[in-house]
Amino acid sequence: MAVIGIDAGGTMIKLAYEEKGRIHFRKYANTEMDAAMGWLKLFKWERIALTGSQAAYLQSMYFPAVQIVSEFDAVSNGAKWLHEKENPNSEEEFLLVNMGTGTSWFHIKKTSYKRILGSGIGGGTIIGLSSMLTNEQNFSAITDLAAKGKHNKLDLLVKDLYDKEDIGVNGNLTASNFGKGQEANGSQEDGISSLFQMVAETIVLLTQQASTIHQVDKIVYAGGAVYGNKPLQKIITSFDYLFPAKQVFLQDGQFCGAIGAFLAIE
C-alpha cells in the first residue's frame, strides 16, 4: 500500500488506496480523527493526495509535503471512474448529483466536466434540522427514524387542499412541506420523514431543471448523504417519471472524492 487518496470533508474522512491490484476504501467520522491517523501511520505511504474542505487542515497538521487536489476535479473524475467501472461499455455523458454536506451538480462528459449548480440543501441540512427536531445527530440513526415515519402527518398534500376536486395534479404530491405546522399530530419519526421528503423533492426538482437546460438524460447520484440511504433514495426514485431515463446511485459513490484524489497522483 504505497499510494492513497484522502477526501477530508465536513463530516467524514474517506480513503481510497490500491492493494494487490484492487481499489479499497475506508472511512472515518471527523470525530474519529485520531483513529484515522493511527491507521494511516501503520503503513509507509510513498504518495498521498488530499481533497475536500478539510484538506488544507490535514496538510498543515499531518502531511505538509503532499499535494491538494481540487475538490471539483476529484469528485468529477472519481465519479466518472466509478461510473465506467459499473458500466464498462458506456461512454455516455451524465449529470452527477453529488450530495454531501451540501449538493453540487456536474455535467460529466467523456473528456471534461463542468459544475453547473450548487445548493446548501444536503446532508448538513438533514443533520442540522434533525438535531433541532429530535436532538439526534447520528446520520444512521436519523435515517432509521425517517424509515419509520410518515411525511403526510406533517406535510400538506395537494389532496388536503382540494379534497375531491380534480385539478389535474396527483393528489399525493406535496403542496407544502411541514405545511400542517402546529396543528399536526406527528411523531419525531414523522418529522424526520417530512424533512427527508423536503430535501429529496428540492434536489429532484433542481436536478430536473439542470437536466432540461443542459439536455442530459442520465442522472447519477453520489455522495455521503445519499449513499446507503434507502429512505432518501426511495423518495428520489419515486420521481423517475420526470426523467427520460431512470435515476441511478453509484455503488461506492461516497468515495468519489477519495478516488479522484487517488487518480490525480502521478
Image: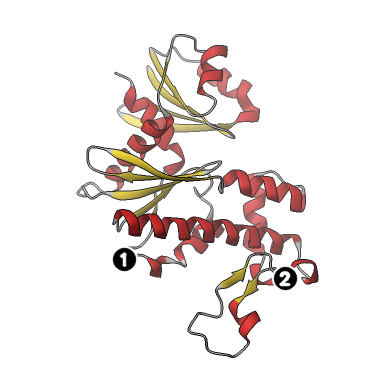
Which quadrant is the C terminus positioned in? top left
Residue at left offset 46%, top offset 56%: 206
Q: Horizontal and vertical percent for residue 15?
A: 46, 29
Residue at left offset 53%, top offset 89%: 166
Along the line of sight, the residue nearer the viewer: 110 or 117? 117
Q: Which residue is mark 2?
A: 180
**Where 25 sits versus 62, above or below?**
below
**Where 190 sits versus 11, above or below?**
below
Which quadrant is the N terminus positioned in? top left
The alpha-carbon separation of the residues under discs 1 and 2 comes to 33 Å
Toward the front, the furthest residue is: 213
The reply to whether residue 1 is in sight is no
**Where 171 sits versus 258, above or below?**
below
Label placed on residue 244: 1
Q: How many marks?
A: 2
Secondary structure under the numbered disc 2 in the rendered image: loop
Looking at numbered disc 2 in the image, what kind of residue is underneath it? Lys
